[in-house]
Image (cartoon, rainbow, N blue to C red):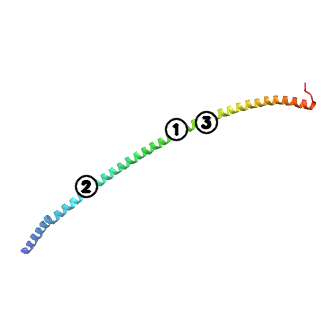
Amino acid sequence: MSPDLSLVWVIFFVLLLAVVLDRLLLRPINDVIARRRQAIASARSLADESATRARTAADEFESRTQAARAEVYRQMDERRRQAMDRRADILARTRREVDDEVAGARATLKADAAAARAQLERDAGALADSIVERVLGRQAS
């Protein structure tokens, strides 16, 4: 039994069809798939690189923001300290002025009291003489 010639032709056409399909359909499709995979890998690489740069920029922004906040807080503390120093100076100066005025008022009050006592003593003596003169009708000796 010898193979039928039609079987040979079918095998030939199947092989020819396989070669034609491989050249005209499968290789272009495989090339497109390979280019898409390469484009996806490239896009993924770019996305990862962009994400890394974004994280770096965010970290730098955060560190600069923290540094700026620290500087602002330092300046606020310095100004608060200066204000407290000025307040303490004003308060001390005011206390000294008040103490000086109180001391001056006390000295004036003591002098006025001494003068009033002296005046009262003089007036008391004169008043006593006047009372004795009126009561006795003559001057006391």
Of marks 2 and 1, the one in the foreground: 1
Indicate whether 27 appears above or below 137. Answer: below
Q: Quadrant of the C terminus?
A: top right
For residue 94, the mark is: 3
The residue pinned by badge 1 equals 82
Pick whichever of labels 2 and 1 is earlier in the sequence: 2
At which x and y percent is residue 122? 81, 28
The picture places residue 41, in percent across and down from the top left corner, at 26, 56
Coordinates of residue 58 in the picture (x, y in percent): 37, 50
Q: Would you say the residues marked 2 and 1 are in contact, meaning their CB atoms lie under 8 Å apart? A: no
Q: Look at the numbered disc 1 and give the secondary structure of its residue.
A: helix
Horizontally, residue 114 falls left or right of residue 97, namely: right
Q: Which quadrant of the view contains residue 93?
A: top right
Are dots 3 and 2 in contact, CB under 8 Å? Answer: no
Amino acid under label 3?
A: Thr
Quadrant holding the N terminus: bottom left
> How many numbered marks does the figure carry?
3
Q: Is residue 78 left or right of residue 124?
A: left
Of 83 and 9, which appears nearest the observer?
83
Q: Which residue is mark 2?
A: 42
Q: Earlier in the sequence, mark 3 or mark 1?
A: 1
Residue at 30% of width from left, 54% of height from top? 47
Q: Earlier in the sequence, mark 3 or mark 2?
A: 2
Disc 3 to disc 1: CB gap under 8 Å: no
Q: Residue at x 64, y 35 (%)?
A: 98
Which one is nearer the viewer's eye here, 44 or 71? 71
Residue nearest the observer in this picture, 7 or 52: 52
Amino acid carrying label 1: it is Gln
Which amino acid type corresponds to the residue marked 2 in the rendered image? Ser
